[in-house]
Image (cartoon, grey):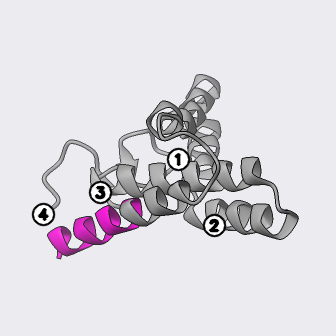
Amino acid sequence: MKQLLRTEEVMLFVLGAWLFSQLPYDWWWFPALLLIPDLGMLGYLAGNRAGARAYNLTHHRGLAAGIYLLGIFLSLPLVQLIGVIMFSHTAMDRALGYGLKYYRGFGYTHLGEIGKNNG
């Protein structure tokens, strides 16, 4: 099951890359911006609860899709770009086993504890 879920996330990442290809930006922007959502980790400087909230906000697939769709509705490629980057980053993270965070600390995710064999 774990491999099936990872494969699904890889395919969602590919979808994100394709959506990016439909935008009017050079390809180098995609890898250059891909780690920007991890700035949400800075919330951990204010503690576990604030960190989990900030991280989860920047890694929420529904929010990413909503931002992307808002960009389509408003005909704003920059807003679409923000949504695509959030969406793609989230798929990449989840394919690597990094999930949404619980308040107990960074290592506790909805996919299991980071560093533990949860297979």
How far is the residue under mark 2 from the one under mark 3?
18 Å
Q: Please, what secondary structure does the residue beneath circle 1 have? A: loop
Q: Is residue 2 magenta?
A: yes
How far is the residue under mark 1 from the one under mark 3?
22 Å
Identify the residue position indicated by label 3 in the image.
95
Q: Determine whether, in the image, residue 27 is placed left or right of residue 9.
A: right
Q: Position of residue 84 (x, y in %)?
A: 58, 55
Return the disc, 1 or 4, that comes first in the chain's sequence: 1
- Residue 103 marker: 1
Q: Please, what secondary structure does the residue beneath circle 4 have? A: loop
The quarter of the picture where residue 25 lies is top right
Identify the residue position indicated by label 2 in the image.
65
Q: Please, what secondary structure does the residue beneath circle 3 have? A: helix
Residue type at mark 2: give it: Ala
Residues shaded magenta: 1-13
Asked if the residue under mark 3 is in contact with the one under mark 4, i.e. CB atoms within 8 Å, the reply is no
Q: Determine whether, in the image, residue 82 is placed left or right of residue 19.
A: right
Residue type at mark 3: give it: Ala
Determine the main secondary structure of the stretch shown in magenta: helix
Return the disc, 2 or 4, that comes first in the chain's sequence: 2
- Residue mark closest to the camera, 2 vs 4: 2
- Residue mark closest to the camera, 1 vs 4: 4
Q: Position of residue 23 (x, y in %)?
A: 62, 54
Q: Residue at x 44, y 56 (%)?
A: 17
Identify the residue position indicated by label 4 in the image.
119
User: Label 4: how many residues lie within 10 Å, few (<14), some (14-19) or many (20+)?
Assistant: few
Return the disc, 4 or 3, that comes first in the chain's sequence: 3
Return the disc, 1 or 2, that comes first in the chain's sequence: 2
Residue type at mark 4: give it: Gly
Asked if the residue under mark 2 is in contact with the one under mark 1, i.e. CB atoms within 8 Å, the reply is no
Q: Position of residue 46 (x, y in %)?
A: 65, 26
How far is the residue under mark 1 from the one under mark 4?
23 Å
